[in-house]
Image: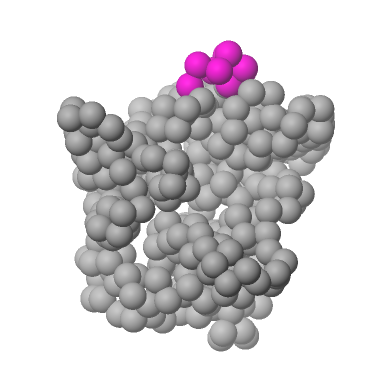
Amino acid sequence: MQRTSLKLDEARPSTRGRNRYFDLLRAGALMRVIVYHTVGWPWLHLLVPAMGVMFALGGCLMAKSLDRQPPVRVVVSRMRRLLPPVWAFGILAIAMGWVAVGVGRHEWIHLLYWLVPLRDPESHAVGFGYVDILWYVRTYLWFVILSPVLLMAFRKAPVATLVAPLALLPVAALTSLFTSAGRGAVTDILGFGTCWTLGFAAYDGFLAALPVLVCGVVVAALSAVGLTLEVAYPFAGSGGSGPVFVGYALFSAAWVLVLMRWNPDMSWMRKSGWLRRAVAIINARAVTIYIWHDAAIAVIAIFVHATRMHVSRVAELPAVLLLTALAVLALGWVEDLAARRQPVLLPRAG
């Protein structure tokens, strides 16, 4: 055990500077989310398992932070950076009547879930989409809270910790115990738990030390089972339930393993100033982009319906991107304040 730990420590990447490859992965994953939610092409969620990638990158960043600071300080810091953009979204959503807090005199307590979204706030049918998009924030927040324990477990038993979420997922997903909006935390945590801990594995050098043959066999097996379940059952995508969600979780883990193990040379990005700036902006405004892009999609859909225009969903994509960009310009500075940076309209490339 001691020899293994030494090997992983030596393989651990430097903590200095930003990882441009990870930044590019996050930017690409966010853009894929917007495109998929706009145009609805089912094959996109297999082409790029975006949510799994985003959770894996979060796990890697948490492992890095937990190695540098006490666990309580890390958890509080991550919550401080994550929640203010959500609060801004909640204030505007509630003020504009997009989201309800349920029915009955006792349901106002659900406003607390806008402060700390350990569960989705209640909603009515009209506002459901605006609340549903917060499942990612809710799951990310749970991972942040659980990370100190998960990282200790991973370093004591890496393989068991990586396998456990996928092994337990069928019990939760196939029995339909936790599938309603706001109550899917268990299936989401299990469904993306392996992706999050693969972020630990990438940071600790576990993936770099994994033989290519072993990696290939694992990826092939997970992909085969995952795709079989995806094809055999009606499509539900990420955040679904039942066999198709198990299949999506397996497929996501397989390709996250590939992407997080791969460590390409990113020196070519230095020659592309516009790309470095775009990637920097997307990463610095990731939460704002994620939580507001669905609102942009809804606004465009309402406009198209009201004007009785006949346009394809692909043709709506530029307008969705434009509205999302306007939300970034209007509210992106909240992320600067949350990170204790000087607020700027658009961040510069690092």
- The magenta segment is 170-178
Picture layout, residue 342 above or below residue 140 = below
Residue 300 appears in the rendering: no
Camera-nearest residue between 220 and 306: 306
Q: Is residue 310 visible?
A: yes
The x, y position of residue 111, in whole percent, is: 22, 41
Q: Position of residue 190 (x, y in %)?
A: 52, 27
Residue 341 found in image quarter: bottom left
> Looking at the image, which is closer to me, 248 or 208?
248
Q: Is residue 127 above or below residue 250?
A: below
For residue 43, side relative to residue 321 (left or right): right
Residue name at image x 58 percent, y 44 percent = 52
Residue at 56% in and 37% down = 239
Q: In the image, what residue occupies the spot 65% across and 40% down?
A: 237
Check if residue 171 falls in the magenta segment.
Answer: yes
Give the quarter of the figure containing the C terminus: bottom left
Question: What is the x, y in percent for residue 228?
Answer: 81, 29
**Where's residue 159, x and y in %?**
58, 25
Q: Is residue 275 magenta?
A: no
323 with respect to 168 (left or right): left
